[in-house]
Image (cartoon, rainbow, N blue to C red):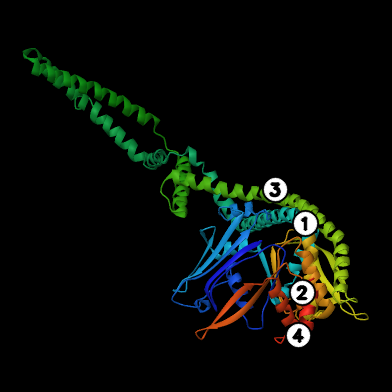
Amino acid sequence: MLTSLYIKNYALIDELNVAFNNGLTIITGETGAGKSILLGGLSLVLGKRADLSQVKNAEEKCIIEAVFDIANYDLKELFKVLDLDYDVQTIIRREILPSGKSRAFINDTPVTLESLVALSSYLIDIHSQHQTQQLTQDDYQFKVIDALAENKSNLETFSKGLVAYKSLQKDLEELKLSKAELIKEYDYNLFLSNELKEINLEKIDLEDLENQYEELNNVETIGEKLSSSKVILNTEDLGAIDQLKAVKQELSKIAGFGKLYESLKARIDSVGIELEDILVELDNLEENLSTDPQELEQIGSKLQIINNLFQKHSVSEIEELITIKNDLKSKIDNTEILDDTIRLKEEQILKLEEKLNQVALKIHNKRKKIIPVFVSKLEAILSDLGMPNAKFKVELETTRHFLKNGKDNLQFLFMANKGSSFNELKKSASGGELSRIMLAIKSILAEYIQLPSIMFDEIDTGVSGEISNKMGEIMKQMSSQMQVFTITHLPQIAAKGNSHFKVFKTDIEEVTHTQLKKLNEDERIVEIAQMLGGLNITDSAMAHAKQLLN
């Protein structure tokens, strides 16, 4: 509940500090006295956007501060979500600086307007003509029925499930798009992969393959040179080996004359051994040398394939081709297993659909059960409010699709008079009728859920006499469960209040100021008498005012 309101330097208000009690609080005042200013200041606390034109003295800071007792509102979790310190005496403050910038604070912690609106919606509900129009909107109608049906936990479960469901659907759609793209590339990737597989890259030694090709391609030249080398080494008397033997014999004769000559002879011996080995190797090479045109063609073909693959994939190493082959295999495998992934995702969606359908059915059944109770209560109240022939119908239709709050379409239908037909509320109810319907609905809601404090801004416009008395009784009854404010011009309603404030203007040094005063018992009698008969108060008006108050 709102326990106090402080306003400084706002519109026609210099400074105002007022405390409020529980129950029904009446606010009266002549037209133009500044009741809208009071509402405007309170709206700023609740998150309405501010501008410098609302400041009385643009050179000074404007401050609006409201204190709420939130002990019974169960808002600890919300404070945690908003990252705020919880206190049962919560203080909300708005400041408009001379620069035009505004600041908001909750329990002295700076907050954004979004956080302010998120909290204030739980604290006070300012009911204006604009909010009456909300009654014709689907969201508000669902809010009413679901509040009465106690669907809060079911709706929270459904909402979380719906978020997960839509996320899975989005994943599935992306998987199917990916599959479509991969299928376009699949055949080409498969062709490239098979082409790389056929060459058996892991078993290829490119250098060895190139050496084999050079040997086979030059076998005649190699044979000639091997043979001539053997001749040079091994021709009798003239061959290098025989010549080396002659050198060896000569050096043997002087080897005993010193270590230098002995070393030369040893080196000639080593060279002789090496030449003998080379001759054996030449024999072996010549003996094993063969001409194989078919093998030459095969190796040349393989080298040509490898070079073509190098060019096609813009690489120069076998290892790079192997990497490309592995990447292609991954793409092909991903394409082939994508169907399994899609099928698994579809199974998850079906399971979640089943759960959502179960929760949606619970929501529907609770709505269906409460609607007759709601209609009965609403028609009874409307009858008391001067609409004895008013009939209400709530149509609830289940759809095939998941909506944000279940699977139902909901519509409030209204018939004001006998002989007419049911029609949409916004088409069949006048402004005055909508106000009374809204009051009736609020009073029904108050029986079922803890509503925030509510301020009715001239909800009694267009009614009088006994109807206004009934409206006052309804607000009085609501105030037994919650804090109710009402701005009214009707004495029958004003007399129902637990406390009564008057908004009025005064002129001080040719400057107009708006003030708010709490009336005592005698002052209330005078105020109500003026509401009954005007400024010239008669004895009968005073007597009537006392009668209303008693």
Q: Mark 4 to mark 2: distance in Å?
A: 20 Å
Give the mark nearest the N terminus, 3 or 1: 1
Residue 43, quarter of picture: bottom right
Q: Earlier in the sequence, mark 1 or mark 4?
A: 1
Q: Secondary structure at mark 1?
A: loop
Tell me: residue 113, above or below residue 458: above
**Residue 538 bears which disc, if any?**
4
Q: Where is mark 1, residue-wise?
A: 151
Gap in Å between the C-alphas at discs 3 and 1? Answer: 32 Å
Label placed on residue 493: 2
Task: Name the residue that disc number 3 marks.
Answer: 344
Mark 3 surroundings: few (<14), some (14-19) or many (≥20) residues within 10 A: few
The image quadrant of residue 389 is: bottom right
Nearer-the-camera pick, 315 or 58 = 58
N-terminal of the pair, mark 2 or mark 3, is 3
Find the distance from the CA under tag 2 to the CA under tag 3: 64 Å
Q: Residue furthest top?
A: 256
Q: CA distance from mark 1 to mark 2?
A: 34 Å
Q: Quadrant of the C terminus?
A: bottom right
Answer with mark 1 or mark 2, whichever residue precedes in sequence.
1
Tell me the kind of residue under disc 3: Leu
